[in-house]
Image: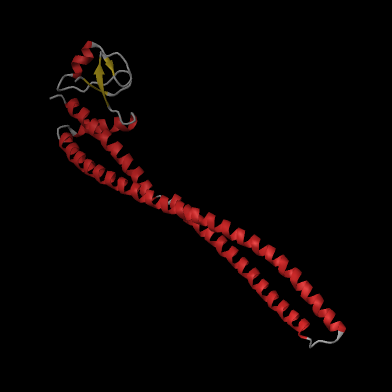
Amino acid sequence: MNPTVYLFKLQSIDTQLTKIRQRLEEIGTLLGDDTAIRQAQDQVTRTQATVKSAHNQLKQIEDAVASRRNKKEQSESMLYSGKVKNPKELQDLQNESAALKRAIGNLEDQQLEAMLELEEAEKVHNQAARELAELQASDTQQKASLRGEQSALQKDEARLLVEREMVAAQVSEEMLSRYDRLRKQKRGVAVAAISDGSCRACGAAITPAEQQAARSPSQMVLCPTCGRILYAG
């Protein structure tokens, strides 16, 4: 049998192996890429910190309101107890009570704003947490699919390697060496089929004599234009 038949089969196998290995490399990259998950986790962490800060701010204001209310109650208790007789002391208590009332009003306004800020921060955080959960579920599903594809491709690769070894055994070392060099030089296409009297790789016309020679079991004919091994199927 013409050795180019085996070289043509070998090229088909090598082409499949190249595609499989490229895809396996892509899958390996995808399986190791957790950028989106980490970014979503970082967002959850940031929004959680914002919630904590807003909660602490609200707590400080609530404590300040409680403290001033307590002082106001004490001042009013003294003011209306009848124990304070000095007019200046009474005036001071009235002024203190009024000032505390104004301070409490201001703080209550701040408290309302802080409550709204906390509510908004919790809303943003909850949304970030939901998006993270959805992304994790999708990532788990996608990676399970990728691992299944990876396993199938690895089996195909092993099968093709065995097949390649069997086909390569039918060709001389010299022809294999030339084939390997041409594959590197010609972007993976070392053997070109003759189709309608032309080289399928470059389109150059192949003479009837060259076509006949390409069918010979003892010759290796190269395309006169692109230099690839010609295969006459």
The colour style of the image is secondary structure
Q: How many marks?
A: 0
Which quadrant holds residue 85?
Answer: bottom right
Q: Percent from the top left, x then y, of residue 144?
A: 31, 49
Image quarter hosting the N terminus: top left
Q: Percent from the top left, x then y, of residue 100?
A: 75, 73
Q: Percent from the top left, x then y, of residue 153?
A: 26, 42
Residue at 14 percent of width and 32 percent of height:
170
Figure check: 69 above or below 12 = below
Which quadrant holds residue 122?
Answer: bottom right
Q: Is residue 216 left or right of residue 33?
A: left
Name the residue nearer the viewer: 35 or 91: 91
Can residue 38 be seen in the rendering of this structure? no
State the residue lying farthest toward the left: 1
Name the residue nearer the viewer: 12 or 66: 66
Q: Is residue 39 left or right of residue 110?
A: left
Can residue 231 be seen in the rendering of this structure? yes
Image quarter hosting the C terminus: top left
Name the residue nearer the viewer: 32 or 195: 32
Figure check: 135 above or below 1 = below
Residue at 30 percent of width and 46 percent of height:
145
